[in-house]
């Protein structure tokens, strides 16, 4: 991979992260457009850097001379800490779980783009948007959220 292709991969990561972040931004969530773009960009940059380092240290293509998955595995841990900072609890509700999960998915999409799996990354982006938009719309139409609140209230009356 050339550095120019790496730069193209980073740009693609920003676009995919922006697609998810835009949906979060329209709902006025704490982690919105810029946050999702930065998460996918960062994950892609680590992956592209990892690929470039392994290729640079292994010009003859010898087997066993570098492992691009090592940096990727640490991204999973790191994004967990970032996402955990978004989750908070107030009284009887937990907030930020969907946004935290969205950041986790955005990081995976960035890794996919960084590794050159564009179609899978694009499909993952569309599937994420399906969950965030279509499933959210369906929940609202089925009044699932109010029903959950009612069930929670009934449970608290039993205490």
Image (spheres, rainbow, N blue to C red):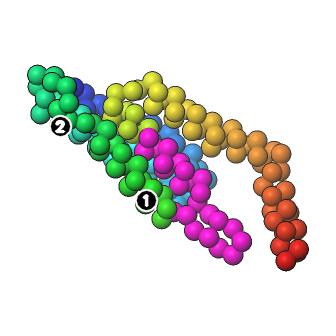
Residue 57: image x %, image y %? 12, 33
Asked whether residue 3 appears in the rendered view, the answer is: no
Residue farthest along the front direction in this orientation: 64
Name the residue located 84 percent from the left edge and 56 percent from the top edge. Answer: 147
User: Would you say 124 lies left or right of 79 here?
Assistant: right
* Left or right of residue 90: residue 154: right
Q: Which residue is mark 2?
A: 53
Is residue 32 among the parts visible in the rendering?
yes
The answer to which of 31 and 52 lies nearer the viewer is: 52
Relative to 60, 100 lies left or right: right
Q: Do labels 2 and 1 touch, CB within 8 Å?
A: no
Element under disc 1:
helix
Q: Is residue 88 above or below residue 111?
A: below
Residue 111: give x, y in percent of width and height. 38, 38
Residue closer to the observer: 23 or 39? 39
Q: Is residue 99 magenta?
A: yes
Residue at x 53% of width, y 48% of height: 102
Image location (x, y in percent) of residue 44: 33, 40
Q: Which residue is painted at 40% across and 53% down in the image? A: 77
Q: Tell me if residue 63 is in the magenta stretch.
A: no
Which quadrant of the rendered structure holds the N terminus? top left
Q: Which mark is residue 2?
A: none
Query: Which residue range is magenta in the image?
Result: 86-108
The C terminus appears in which quarter of the rendering?
A: bottom right
Q: Position of residue 82 (x, y in %)?
A: 43, 59
Q: Which residue is mark 1?
A: 82
Q: Residues within 10 Å of mark 2 (few under 14, many from 20)?
A: some
Q: Earlier in the sequence, mark 2 or mark 1?
A: 2
Viewer-nearest residue: 120 or 30: 120
Instruction: Using residue 139 as the reference point, say whether residue 128 is left or right of it.
Output: left
Q: Residue 48 appears in which quarter of the rendering?
A: top left
């Amino acid at each position: 991979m050339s550095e120019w292709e790496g730069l193209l991969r980073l740009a693609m990561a920003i676009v995919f992260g922006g697609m998810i972040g835009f949906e979060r931004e329209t709902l006025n969530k704490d982690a919105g457009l810029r946050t999702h773009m930065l998460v996918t960009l960062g994950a892609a940059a680590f992956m592209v850097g990892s690929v470039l380092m392994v290729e640079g240290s292994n010009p003859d293509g010898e087997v066993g001379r570098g492992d691009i998955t090592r940096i990727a595995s640490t991204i999973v841990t790191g994004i967990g800490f970032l996402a955990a900072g978004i989750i908070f609890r107030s009284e009887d509700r937990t907030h930020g779980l969907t946004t935290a999960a969205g950041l986790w998915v955005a990081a995976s999409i960035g890794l996919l783009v960084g590794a050159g799996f564009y179609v899978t990354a694009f499909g993952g982006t569309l599937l994420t948007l399906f969950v965030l938009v279509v499933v959210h719309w369906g929940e609202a139409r089925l009044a699932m959220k109010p029903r959950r609140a009612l069930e929670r209230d009934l449970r608290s009356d039993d205490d």
